[in-house]
Image (spheres, rainbow, N blue to C red):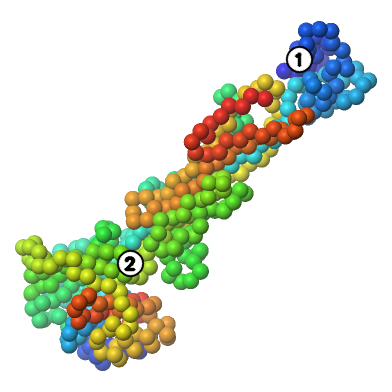
Amino acid sequence: MSMPAIGPLSLADLRAVFGGGPGPIGLRDYLRGGVLVPVSSATSAVPALSPVSLAAYRGARNALDVDYEIIGGGGGGGRGTVNRPVAADRCRIDPPFAGSPGGASRISLASVTLAEAGGGLGGKGQCEAEASLCWAVAREYAGCPGEASPFGPGGAKTPANNHGADAPPGSYGAGGAGAGGDNYDTYDEPGYPGTGGQAGTYVTGTLLVDVGQSLRLQSGAPGVGGSGASYVGGRGAGGLVRLSHASRAGPVVHQVVGGLGADRVVTW
Amino acid sequence: MTLWSDLAGVFPSLERLPEAARPHVVELIPSARGTEQSLCVVFDEGEALRMTAPEVPAFILSLTAHRYAVDLDSLGTGAERYYVDEIFDPEVALRGWICAGGVVAEEKTYRRAGPGRLLIDRRDANGAWLTRDEPECVGSDVDWSGEPHVLESARAALAAGEILGFLVLKKEGRSQSYLRIYGVVP
């Protein structure tokens, strides 16, 4: 709720917008940074000290600057095989070969999305051509690591004949590793490893949130690894939504992270 | 060509390989069964196998695979050995057949049993078990029981970048060993 932008202003308008007790009020009760008027971009014209006039409140709004950072869930790693796949089944980006993408993270007000960050794409399944780019030596047939996020590394590079490593849970939004393939063994031809899942999109910004307004925070679910073959791709890390606001009493932080209970309503 | 000519000196059957089939050779597998030695060639297509062994049963050529193989020294003996890699069943690495004049007498299934180890099942033409779970595993160079010169040739070829690598395999409890030479450029 905002103070009128045009027309006359009154103490009643101040009480309606910023609150205040039932008793007599004065402008000194509505100084910026006091109990009733928050320090925010919506109250920048309001003085923090007397003297103050009603004109200073024109268009002011009882709202908070809330910083946010959001990252979508990390993609799962692609699957690996013990057999060399036929040409049509190499470097597949569809399930169950590829890892699934991570879910989107978002902040919404009622049905309106205020900010959103997409999940990372899943890694490709049984893809020697691209997985070889992460090998330290030729014919290593390792699965490639998942993409790191600003919060930490993705799933670690995975040796041949192993399931892909999951992204560490605290590496919000990071990708899972591709599963290992299979190197020359007995009479075997090499199986093809998977590539790592991508990290979710990372977005930061500031929202102007009315005091008393409820925001819904949803963090993206992690992508799961490609499956159905010998080696399953690693799981991505869940997404994150973090809101922070510097109040008079100190920083206020609300966050949700991907996985169970990743949906939360916060009232300011 | 050093490896090729070295092996041809030990296995004259290699020189009888049809010219058109040679570019399709991807592996060579000398075998030593007791005192007998033979050479298996592995092709990257079925047509090269057909050119080399016209009596190969048609069903083998119809299988979808990356590699088709024949023991050159078994041809014309009444116990021809054919092999095809299995690419769809992750439990199985390889399938093999012993045929007499194009008729299957025995079928072998090479099942994976962990890294470096296979278990081989054999059935006769009627599907009756001959043996089951016969182990074969990756060994070291000292397990090669055939002509030492063959192993030396493989080592030299690897050092010269002529091949991608080689592995020695052996049957457990039997005097049989195999030298799988892969990544061959004929």
Residue at x-position 24% and y-position 87%: B146
- Residue A62 visible? The answer is yes
Residue at x-position 36% and y-position 66%: A190
Q: Chain of mark 2?
A: B
Please tell me whether mark 1 sits on a helix, a strand or a loop. loop
User: Which quadrant would the N terminus of chain A be assigned to in this image?
Assistant: top right
The x and y percentages for residue A118 are: 55, 41
Judging depth in this view, the residue of A5 and A68 nearest the camera is A68
User: Which residue is situated farthest in the left direction here?
Assistant: B126
Q: What is the three-letter code of the residue carrying label 1? A: Gly
Crowd band around label 2 with a 10 angstrom C-alpha radius: few (<14), some (14–19), many (20+):
few
The quadrant holding residue B46 is bottom left
Please tell me whether mark 2 sits on a helix, a strand or a loop. loop
The residue to which callout 1 is attached is A19
User: Which residue is situated farthest in the right direction here?
Assistant: A51
The x and y percentages for residue B85 are: 25, 66
The residue to which callout 2 is attached is B115
